Image (cartoon, helix red, strand yellow):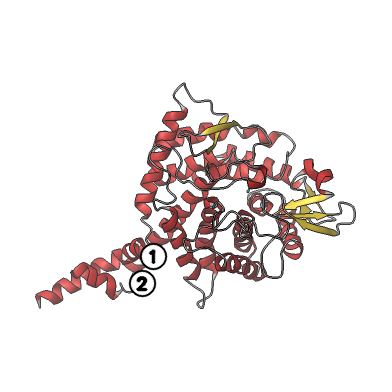
């Protein structure tokens, strides 16, 4: 009888706790610990950046292996990574509720405002403004962010070529590449256009985003679902000329972060359109990526580098994909539900292990990302966008777990026997 009473109270407790307990242990991801780790690193970074009073126009970009503090770059229009550090601060503020972090996030974000008042340098305007002002607007709903984001979206849209059906990613490289060029990374920037069209901007912005996604889907993928980094089109006729690489091993190889942008991008386009062809496509791009991963779920920088297993990894691709899969899993039907989530949790467990965490001597969250291997830059380093998507993925997982806990406490699914038995031990 006494045991039955204990069992009944445990059932009630489990009703409240089961999902978070299960998810923290099953996937091996200690979300709360990982978020606390990130908060410590953010606070330490700010202290190091502010030793001689902070210059808010200098944005953390990378930490090479021998270094311990962020190498920063000026937030100029051609520095594509400047939005990630403000974005990290916003995510960390969301997680920690630390008012000091919010204050710093606002200051760094405001350094990018001027980009909304000048012609788009290239497609990266989306990364720059969504990660900074997009996050600020999401958390504060301030009118200034809205104004900046709407102006930036209009500016990004000027790069759209209606004959081709895509945004010109790199205006500066038209001659070098032999025509209108669109890179896979550009998929991420469509989110700014979708956002603007829902928040007072023109409907045309949405049409541009959809056309870009459709044209890219048609031309920039191989039959197996892997992608070319760059598609080159005839600017006048719109004809697809060739698929090539810029940051990958070769034109026909699969550059890990390019595939990561594709998975993330098509998942987002499905969220914004509800069009099932984009969901199917996101799954196809994800499935071929998952099939080719090494055991620890963190890809080599390019899946086809003949130097594998000696080739460097790209933890940043793993972070982008982990975040994307946590979203994609929600859209899957019953037959696939849980599949992508499990993969994402394995990736996060691996990234949170000693093998990928930056040591205590470094201000970054993670090591082992590869930026631009063919150019010999940022190889096996800490890179700011890896940290940004890592934190995003952790927060997505935390939100999923909290929702499940709520559902369970409202009478959702029963706690598993394993959890009950563990508590009884
Ligand atoms: N968007 C550039 C990169 O992924 O390296």
Q: Position of residue 144 (x, y in %)?
A: 59, 37
Instruction: Check disc 1 and report its element: helix, strand or loop.
Output: helix
Q: Position of residue 214 (x, y in %)?
A: 73, 63
For this orientation, the residue located farthest to the right is 236
Give the quarter of the figure containing the C terminus. bottom left
Residue 55 versus residue 65 in the image, above or below: above
Tell whether 87 sits left or right of 172: left
Asked whether the beta carbons under mark 1 and mark 2 sit within 8 Å of each other, the answer is yes
Q: What numbered label is drawn on residue 404?
A: 1
Residue assigned mark 2: 412
Q: Where is residue 97 in the image (x, y as percent from the top left)?
A: 39, 42
Please indicate, yes or no, whether residue 309 appears anywhere in the rendered image: yes
Instruction: Check disc 2 and report its element: helix, strand or loop.
Output: loop
Q: Is mark 1 within 8 Å of ligand 1?
A: no
Residue 136 versus residue 14 in the image, above or below: above
Looking at the picture, tell me which residue is in the foreground, 80 or 195. Answer: 80
Give the quarter of the figure containing the N terminus. bottom left
Q: Distance between the residues labelled 1 and 2?
A: 8 Å
Please indicate, yes or no, whether residue 11 appears anywhere in the rendered image: no
Tell whether 269 sits left or right of 44: right
Circle nearer the N terminus (1, 2)? 1
Tell whether 400 sits left or right of 222: left
Q: Which residue is drawn at 72% across and 42% down?
A: 122
């Amino acid at each position: 009888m006494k045991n039955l009473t204990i069992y009944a109270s445990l059932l009630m407790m489990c009703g409240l706790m089961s999902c978070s307990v299960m998810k923290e242990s099953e996937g091996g991801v200690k979300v709360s610990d990982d978020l606390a780790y990130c908060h410590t690193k953010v606070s330490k970074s700010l202290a190091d950046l502010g030793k001689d009073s902070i210059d808010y126009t200098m944005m953390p970009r990378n930490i090479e292996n021998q270094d311990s503090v962020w190498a920063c770059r000026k937030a100029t229009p051609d520095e594509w990574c400047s939005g990630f550090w403000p974005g990290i601060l916003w995510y960390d503020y969301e997680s920690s509720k630390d008012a000091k972090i919010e204050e710093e996030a606002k200051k760094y974000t405001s350094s990018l405002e001027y980009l909304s008042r000048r012609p788009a340098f290239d497609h990266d305007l989306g990364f720059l403004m969504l990660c900074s002002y997009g996050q600020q607007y999401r958390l504060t709903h301030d009118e200034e962010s809205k104004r900046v984001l709407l102006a930036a979206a209009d500016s990004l849209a000027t790069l759209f070529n209606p004959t081709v059906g895509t945004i010109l990613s790199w205006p500066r490289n038209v001659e070098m590449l032999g025509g209108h060029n669109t890179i896979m990374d550009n998929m991420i920037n469509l989110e700014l256009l979708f956002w603007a069209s829902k928040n007072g901007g023109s409907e045309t912005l949405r049409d541009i985003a959809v056309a870009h996604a459709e044209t890219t889907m048609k031309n920039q993928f191989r039959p197996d679902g892997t992608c070319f980094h760059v598609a080159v089109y005839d600017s006048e006729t719109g004809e697809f000329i060739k698929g090539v690489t810029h940051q990958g091993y070769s034109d026909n190889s699969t550059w890990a972060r390019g595939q990561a942008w594709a998975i993330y991008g098509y998942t987002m386009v499905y969220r914004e359109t509800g069009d099932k062809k984009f969901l199917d496509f996101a799954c196809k791009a994800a499935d071929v990526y998952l099939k080719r991963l090494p055991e620890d779920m963190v890809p080599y920088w390019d899946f086809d580098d003949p130097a594998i297993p000696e080739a460097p990894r790209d933890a940043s691709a793993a972070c982008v994909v982990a975040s994307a899969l946590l979203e994609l899993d929600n859209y899957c039907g019953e037959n696939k539900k849980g599949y992508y989530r499990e993969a994402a949790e394995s990736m996060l467990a691996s990234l949170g292990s000693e093998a990928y965490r930056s040591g205590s001597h470094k201000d970054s969250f993670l090591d082992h990302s590869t930026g631009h291997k063919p150019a010999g830059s940022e190889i096996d380093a800490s890179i700011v966008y890896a940290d940004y998507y890592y934190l995003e993925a952790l927060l997505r997982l935390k939100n999923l777990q909290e929702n499940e806990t709520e559902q369970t406490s409202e009478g959702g699914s029963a706690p598993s026997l394993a959890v009950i038995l563990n508590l009884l031990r």
